[in-house]
Amino acid sequence: MTTNEALVKYCLRLGDSSLILGQRMAAWCSNGPVLEEDIALSNIGLDLFGQARTMLTYVGEIEGKGRTENDLAFKRLEREFYNTLLSERPNGHFGDTVVRNLLHSAYTYHLYTALKDSSNETIAAFASKSLKEITYHLRHSAEWVVRLGDGTEESHNKAQVSLNEIWEYTDDLFTMNEVDDLLIKENVAVDLNNIKSLWSNTINEILERATLSRPEDSFMQAGSLNGMHSEVLGHLLAEMQFLPRAYPDANW
Amino acid sequence: MSKTPQYNTDKIWNFLSEIPDPEIPVITIAELGVLRNVELLDNTIIVTITPTYSGCPAMKAFEDDIKSALQHHNIESFEVKTVHSPAWTTDWMTEKARTKLKNFGIAPPIKGTQDKGVLFEQGPKEVQCPQCGSNSTKLVSQFGSTACKALYNCETCKEPFDYFKCI
């Protein structure tokens, strides 16, 4: 694997995770529990789409196949997506969504903080820009998890179930392969083991405030590095890609 | 024989800087800090802009407005370039823009306030109501009508208002 091939894969991970989570958040538009939350959830989606565009446009430039950000978003199949397994988890109810978002935004918060110093200028710029937005996303989801966890008996129990059910997808965030080995040497990427301990501390702090118990690591899912996803990604893509595939000449 | 046009980047900056923000028409793209640079490179005008937020839908409008302003001034060879570094910050917003925002009914970002604490921050302590001037206001949501604004409520005049949040 050349450094350029590794860089393409790495940037696809970043871009795809933003894109897929963004698509999940967009599905909340007009379905939020209250108007303010409807706006907040859609706004988070918008930030994520913006972040995805930066990375996918860059991938198009460096892979040299003449693909645009739209080609990459709308004309790839499940196995060609490298988004984190966590980012594709379904929205479920509001509690499921904020728990997922907490786990994911705490991850991107620490990842982007480290990537601000990447030797790759585009990744460094992407990270410092995105970090400002992710900070708001993390605060939003953390406050809600505390409110639900430390709320009524019903909200507490529901939030605990959300957390228990999604926990097995958190390990995938920190898996690494030869792409990471190559790019860490070049100071482009960062060691995800370091990110994991920072993430773990943030999550522990929030869960403690929320009076929720951190689930035990049991069987943990993995596979996003090889484009192995759960069934839900196919359904998401079918909806997201329908229009450009049905009407390839459509323009906007 | 075509004549090489003489471009004056200061002049171009001047007319581009008058383009209003499509969402908040009382301030211009220069006052907002979105317009970063105008330079001449190999007889091509390069206009550099930076987004307030990555997903800001106004970016396309900024770009289109810049293109049509350049064409209006008979400039044909140009490129509008978007950069993400250095990342946009509300600190770049001019005093004049802050006053205009307030008069328009949007509480301007509080300068120097590090509204950037990661967890459990309730935003800046005192955001003044742009309608009645009261300091007794309350954060409703960190996400408002656009990505760059938070939603507040005034406890004195009871009116909701937008606050241009610090990033």
Image (tube, helix red, strand yellow):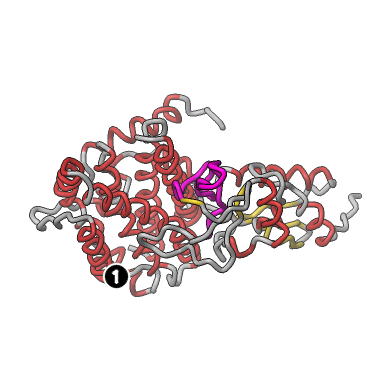
Specify whether A216 is left or right of A166: left
Residue B10 place in picture, x, y as percent: 82, 62
> Within the magenta stretch, is there residue B160?
yes
Residue A113: quarter of image: bottom left
Element on which disc 1 rests: loop
Q: Is B94 displayed left or right of A189 in the figure?
A: right
Q: How many labels does the image show?
A: 1
Observer able to see residue A100: yes
Looking at the image, residue A31 lies above or below residue B137? above
Q: Which residue is drawn at 9% across and 53% down?
A: A219
Which quarter of the image is occupied by the C terminus of chain A?
A: top right
User: Residue A227: in sight, yes or no?
Assistant: no
Residue at position x 41%, y 34% from top? A29
Magenta region: B139-167
Q: Position of residue A61 (x, y in %)?
A: 50, 54
Q: Which chain is home to disc 1? A: A
Disc 1 residue crowd, few under 14, some 14–19, many 20+, Cα 10 Å: some
Please state, as top left, top right, bottom left or bottom right, where the N terminus of chain A lies in the image.
Answer: bottom left
Determine the residue positioned at 39% across, 63% down: B118
Type of the residue with mark 1: Asp
Q: Nearer the viewer, residue A132 or B115?
A: B115
Q: Mark 1 points at which residue?
A: A191
